[in-house]
Amino acid sequence: MHYIYYIGQNLYKKLSKLLGEKYLEFLCKFYNTRNSLNQERFEQLFIKLVKKYEQTADYLKMLYKTKTYWTLCFTSTIFTAAI
């Protein structure tokens, strides 16, 4: 679950220069996607995110492989003791 913290750090390092002024808009949409309450909604939003911000596609696709560690709809079934 601590992986979420590092994703936030790496998003800034890897994508802020690439996206420029659109970075904050992207970040808002990314966290909205990450906070999806069900898997189907997450998948739909993630696809839209990749399409809208094509320049981030490689990084997002790499992140997608580890979604069970950072996406709310996947981690909500894991006991975390409120961490």
Image (cartoon, rainbow, N blue to C red):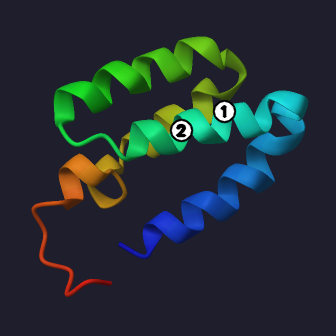
Q: Is residue 45 above or below residue 69?
A: above
Q: Which residue is mark 1?
A: 26
**Which mark, residue 17?**
none
Which residue was labeled with disc 2? 30
Kindly state the secondary structure of the residue where label 2 is placed.
helix
Q: Judge the density around disc 1: few (<14), some (14-19), many (≥20) Cα neighbours within 10 Å.
A: some
Amino acid type at circle 1 is: Phe
| Residue at (60, 39) in percent of width and height | 28
Q: Are marks 1 and 2 in contact (CB under 8 Å)?
A: yes
At 18% from the left and 37% from the top, the residue drawn is 38
Going by the image, does 53 lie left or right of 71?
right
- The quarter in which the N terminus is drawn is bottom left
The answer to which image quadrant residue 18 occupies is top right
The residue at the point 13 percent across, 69 percent down is 78
Q: CA distance from mark 1 to mark 2?
A: 6 Å
Q: Position of residue 16 (x, y in %)?
A: 82, 43
Secondary structure of the residue carrying numbered label 1 = helix
Q: Position of residue 65 (x, y in %)?
A: 36, 43
The quarter holding residue 5 reads bottom right
